[in-house]
Image (cartoon, grey):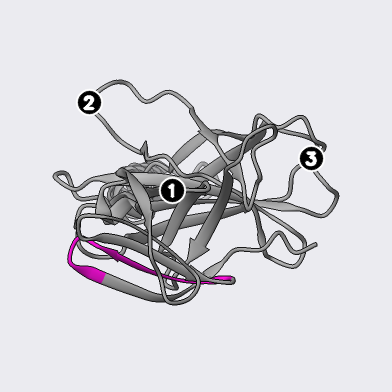
């Protein structure tokens, strides 16, 4: 209590001061608690949010597509690269991913082929094929060899060789023709006067089989054991591995 000099009566200044001080301290303590709680809530919220939006690392195969012929790549052509599951030998390959590239110049054509890691199975076999297309979509060059997408060695960039469709070998009596049987099934043929070499598609092993010309009522026929190639004009029939592929068409350059 403090005495008022003018009245001589005490008043509770000290009490009010002490009460205000205690209230201030209480507010400071409450504010600190709120700050701590808000910080904790923000931290938990932040971790949960980051967990929800965290995306898996991007996966992609990279490399180049090229050919050996000394010819310029025509304008407005495109290249396509396809990742496939080729695990099942007696069925067509299953497409996993596809990329279409507009070349900025001549070969080699660089590519990046993104794919989803969720679609890759550890014990399956995967391959990559490529083609260069005319502006109308017809195939100009195609790959005929198997290019493994994944193996035990560290993955370097793929270099995919493509060969010209319906190319007649210069200075030789053989002609290379690619036949398409639908569902992305292709047979590559090198046809000579008395023999032909058949290259089977990936799901049949990519084997190369030499066939001998045999008699045919019409068209031309080549065979070796139970493997038969018979063609009349641009249409062919293939018998291989106990399976028959009919109405296969010679791929045209589009010119």
> In the rendered image, which residue does mark 3 sit on?
104
Q: Secondary structure at mark 1?
A: strand
N-term-proximal mark, 2 vs 1: 2
> Among all residues in the image, which is located at the extreme right?
75
> In the rendered image, which residue does mark 2 sit on?
152
N-term-proximal mark, 2 vs 3: 3
Residue 128 visible in the shown view = yes
Q: Nearer the viewer, residue 84 or 58?
A: 84
**Where is residue 148 drawn, in percent x and y?**
34, 37
What secondary structure is the magenta-colored segment mainly?
Answer: strand
Q: Secondary structure at mark 3?
A: loop
Q: Nearer the viewer, residue 19 or 121?
A: 121
The range drawn in magenta is: 234-243
- At horizontal 65% and vertical 29% (from top left) the residue drawn is 68
Say whether residue 219 is left or right of residue 52: right
Q: Is residue 234 above or below residue 153?
A: below
Residue 9 in magenta stretch:
no
Residue 237 in magenta stretch:
yes
Q: Is residue 219 above or below residue 228?
A: below
Mark 3 is surrounded, within 10 Å at the Cα level, by few (under 14), some (14 to 19) or many (20 or more) other residues, namely few
Q: Nearer the viewer, residue 161 or 230?
A: 230
Say whether residue 36 is left or right of residue 246: left
Q: Quadrant of the C terminus?
A: bottom right
């Amino acid at each position: 209590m403090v005495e008022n000099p003018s009245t001589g009566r005490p008043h509770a200044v000290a009490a009010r001061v002490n009460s205000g001080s205690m209230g201030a301290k209480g507010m400071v303590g409450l504010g600190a608690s709120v700050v701590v709680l808000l910080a904790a809530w923000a931290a938990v919220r932040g971790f949960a949010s980051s967990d929800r939006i965290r995306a898996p690392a991007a996966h992609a195969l990279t490399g180049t597509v090229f050919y050996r012929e000394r010819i310029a790549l025509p304008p407005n052509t495109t290249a396509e690269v396809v990742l496939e599951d080729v695990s099942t030998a007696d069925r067509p390959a299953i497409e996993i991913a596809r990329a279409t590239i507009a070349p900025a110049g001549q070969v080699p054509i660089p590519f990046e082929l993104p794919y989803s890691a969720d679609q890759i199975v550890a014990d399956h076999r995967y391959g990559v094929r490529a083609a260069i297309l005319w502006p109308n979509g017809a195939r100009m060059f195609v790959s005929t060899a198997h290019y493994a997408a994944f193996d035990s060695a560290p993955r370097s960039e793929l270099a995919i060789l493509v060969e010209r469709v319906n190319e007649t070998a210069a200075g030789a009596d053989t002609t290379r023709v690619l036949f398409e049987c639908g569902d992305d099934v292709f047979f590559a043929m090198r046809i000579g006067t008395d023999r032909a070499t058949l290259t089977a598609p990936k799901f049949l092993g990519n084997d190369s089989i030499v066939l001998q010309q045999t008699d045919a009522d019409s068209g031309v026929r080549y065979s070796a054991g139970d493997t038969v190639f018979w063609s009349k004009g641009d249409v062919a029939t293939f018998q291989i591995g106990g399976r028959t592929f009919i109405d296969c068409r010679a791929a045209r350059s589009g010119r």
